[in-house]
Structure formats: structure tokens, C-alpha cells
Amino acid sequence: MKARKRRVMSSLAALLILAGAIAAHAQQRPDVAEGDDGFSTIELDSGFTFRWKVDGDEIEATISGPTTGWVSVGFNPQNRMQGGTYVIGYVQRGEVNMRHDWGHSATGHRAVTDMGGTSRLTSLGGSEEGGVTELSFRLPLDPGDRYFSPIRTGETNTVIWAFGQNGANSFTAYHAQRGTILVDF
């Protein structure tokens, strides 16, 4: 009985430590550098960079990651990936391929247009140089669309970021790195 109780207590302690580590990761609030040009920038240890400014009723942003594959950012999912607005893309032979996705499940996303919605993404370009893929885009803050999770100014937003393996030039390849940060827009 005592051995069983010790195993249960050890298991419980391990679960609490794991839950704390997950919560700490999910609640990461990185340092934000404010630029003279109105853009704010977050540079993560993974090499992922998120740069943005709110311009009227839109957000203009640039994301980059240390990969020759895809990079992505998502806004305000409800359950892991589900219910989030995503921008994902890659550059292949100088051509920028970018799309607006919706988190349709806890672990999946699809193009908004494939689900009968309207893409709200405006591509501003991208590049792949020196092993870094960079995408620039604009999104409305809240178009009132079924396939769009509003980006809230003056509040804390959950931002999911990820990038794929080198050469993973697709919208469906698995990520090499990913994470979640909290951002005040």
C-alpha cells in the first residue's frame, strides 16, 4: 500500500511539474523592441522573428525563420490550433507562396478558401536568402468573418509561430520548430 501511494504521489508530482512547464511555455511574453518606424519586433531564441504594426483596422507584419522551408504565424486559437487565423507560406525559386488558413481542429489548419470562406490576406512579398525565409503581409484586425479570429488591440493576444524543415516548400509539411507567445497589440 505504501509503495503504491509513493508511486501515485511521484506520478502526481511529475504531472504537476510537466503542467507547470507547459503553462510557462504557453505563457511566454518575450521582450518587444519598439522601432522608430512604428513597428514592434520580437526575436525569439529559435531564430523566429515577428515584426508588426497596427495601421488603422489592419495589422502589417513580417515573419521570418531560419529555414528554406515554410514559416507561419497564427492569431488567437481557442484550443491548441483550432479557431485560429493563420498566415503560412514559403518562397520557391523566387516566387512567394502564401495563404490565409483557419484552424479547423486542435492540430490542423486548412486554406480558408477551401472551406468556402474568403481569404483576408494581402501578400506584401517575401524572400529566401542566406537560409532565412521571410514573408510580409497585411490582415484586417476583425473582418467579422466566420473563418477569422479577431486580433484585439489594447489586449493580450495568443500568437502561435512555427517554421518547417529546410526545403519544406508546402502548406502541409510538419514543423521543425513551434511555439506560443503572448503579445499586446
Image (spheres, rainbow, N blue to C red):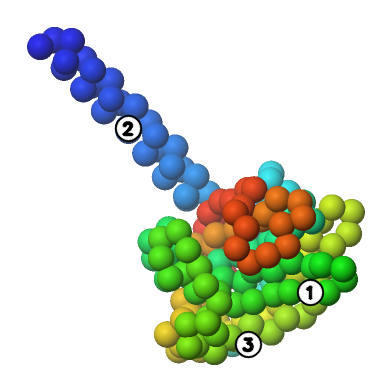
Calculate the distance from the C-alpha at mark 1 to the C-alpha at mark 2: 43 Å
Numbered circle sitting on residue 151: none
Instruction: Check whether the beta carbons of the residues at disc 1 and disc 3 lie within 8 A of each other.
Output: no
Q: Is residue 3 above or below residue 124?
A: above
Left or right of 131? Residue 138 is left
Residue holding disc 3: 56
Residue holding disc 1: 96
Look at label 3 and name its amino acid. Answer: Gly
Identify which residue is drawn at 39% across, 34% down: 18
- Mark 3 crowd level (few <14, some 14–19, many ≥20, 10 Å Cα): few
Calculate the distance from the C-alpha at mark 3 to the C-alpha at mark 2: 45 Å
Q: Residue 149 at x, y = what percent? A: 46, 76
Look at label 1 and name its amino acid. Answer: Val
Q: Residue 139 at x, y = what percent? A: 62, 81
Q: Nearer the viewer, residue 90 or 19?
A: 90
Q: Quadrant of the C terminus?
A: bottom right
Q: Is residue 156 visible?
A: no
Q: First in sequence, mark 1 or 3: give its number.
A: 3
> Image quadrant of residue 8?
top left
Q: Is residue 62 above or below residue 173?
A: below
> Image quadrant of residue 70?
bottom right
Q: First in sequence, mark 3 or 2: give its number.
A: 2
Residue holding disc 2: 15
Label 1 secondary element = strand
Label 2 secondary element = helix
Q: Residue 21 at x, y = what percent? A: 44, 37
Instruction: Check whether the beta carbons of the residues at disc 3 and disc 2 lie within 8 A of each other.
Output: no
Look at label 2 and name its amino acid. Answer: Leu
Identify which residue is drawn at 78% across, 64% down: 134
> Image quadrant of residue 4?
top left
